[in-house]
Amino acid sequence: MTTQAEELAQNAGGAALGAEAGVTTRLRTKAELEQASGLMDAVCERGNLKLAYQRVVENKGAAGVDGIGIAGFKDHLKLHWPTIKAKLLAGDYMPQAVRRVDIEKPQGGIRTLGIPTLTDRMIQQALHQVLSPIFEAEFSESSYGFRPGRNAHQAVKAAKQYVAEDRRVVVDMDLEKFFDRVNHDLLMEKLSKKIGDGRVLRLIRRYLEAGMMADGIVSPRIEGTPQGGPLSPLLSNILLTELDRELERRGHAFCRYADDCNIYVRSQQAGERVMASITRFLADTLKLTVNVAKSAVARPWARKFLGYSLTWHKVPKLKIAPTSLKRLEDKIREVLKGARGRSLTTVITELNPILRGWMAYFKLTETKKALEELDGWIRHKLRCILWRQWKRPYTRAMNLMRAGLTEERAWRSACNQRGPWWNSGASHMNQAFPKSFFDRLGLVSLLDTMRRLQCVQ
């Protein structure tokens, strides 16, 4: 059985992705790419395109301005890829506008995404796969975002280590609308130092300048590299590597994840000095602005980094930041809206993937109190659903008796005229429906999950 990518290679013809299905073609190494006669030829190489196609399809993203989704993408490529490839190799390809999507940030405000068409996402992914090995060797060891073999957990562990080494003041820098403010000329200058193929440079410039469509109207762009395309994270790392090198030159301990940068120093005075000088550097050298309202020089336990915070102990412990806990609570409340009309099993089935995914990210936490409280709060919410579903005192008394309460206590509890939230947290509901009851229904316990995950590590 062939995959979608293999079918595409078989059916699109030699001028499209070509060659035999099932042949594994590795990506070229950095040295091979630098010796290649043209990077665009490497971008359009069958193996590179096949991998790019697979990744775009696996991501199952939304359609762009052309309205072509995953279901129709293969047929679209069969028909149009030979022409697109010829234009890429000739340096004449013009990307389509990106579709504007505004989403609310967890801490307030709006994040603007630019969603390219699937064809442009595949081309950007193919570019990323060729360019990444070239630039990766130049990136800092203190840069963790959107890089192979690096992740947010490594950044959080490094931050903890810096604080353990008595750097107990953090310069927490937030770049104001970074992805919207990237200076195109500066970025292209940095790219041109490593890329000799004019076709690739022109194509990247066109992607940077591609208009953004909202409500059928396309607006031009003169700065920024909107989030939403596969190429944007790499371009952001290329630009911000200059910040990394400046921090290294000054001997600072820091962690950067995309545009989120924390610098760890030993005193408040040093932190204030670093904040002022790096703010000037960013403005003068990279044309970027620090968001004063969201940036601060403070103790690490008063700030958050990638959803985590730290305790104040001499040997600090990782903990989940309060804002991260609140976001989970808000998400759970959304799931539980209207749960009164659904069975408890159905509600738990909807909750479990959210709880598992959240805990997989926050498995590094070293404090259990917040998880115990969250577990208890979730069970409290679920007991409240049961109490509301029962409605009448008779139904409540019968269910409490079935759960093991005496007749006298069940009737007294069912007729107490207290509200659902009070009753769902009271001793009669806790006794009738303890943690073991929810364990049998398969409800994910955050605390138990943390313990299992940490045992595996």
Image (spheres, helix red, strand yellow):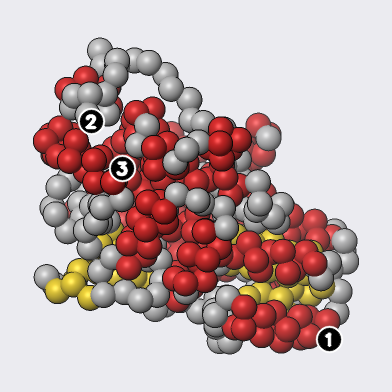
Instruction: Return the residue at label 3.
Output: 89
Q: Position of residue 304 (x, y in %)?
A: 62, 68
Q: Tell me the amino acid under the disc marked 1.
A: Gln
Residue ID at (66%, 74%)? 172
State the residue in front, 400 or 210: 210
Quadrant of the image containing the N terminus: top left
Q: Tell me the amino acid under the disc marked 3.
A: Leu
Q: Position of residue 141 (x, y in %)?
A: 71, 52
Q: Is residue 338 left or right of residue 31?
A: left
Q: Tell me the amino acid under the disc marked 2.
A: Ala
The answer to whether one can see residue 131 in this image is yes
Instruction: Return the residue at label 2.
Output: 16
Mark 2 Cα shell of 10 Å, populated few (<14), some (14-19), many (≥20): many
Residue ID at (54%, 79%)? 288
Of callouts 1 and 2, the N-terminal one:
2
Above or below 440: residue 128: below
Residue ID at (56%, 86%)? 293
Secondary structure beneath dot 2 equals: loop
Q: Is residue 446 left or right of residue 144?
A: left
CA gap, disc 3 to disc 2? Answer: 12 Å
- Residue 354, which numbered label? none
The answer to whether one can see residue 423 in this image is no
Mark 3 Cα shell of 10 Å, populated few (<14), some (14-19), many (≥20): some
Residue ID at (66%, 85%)? 280
Secondary structure beneath dot 3 equals: helix
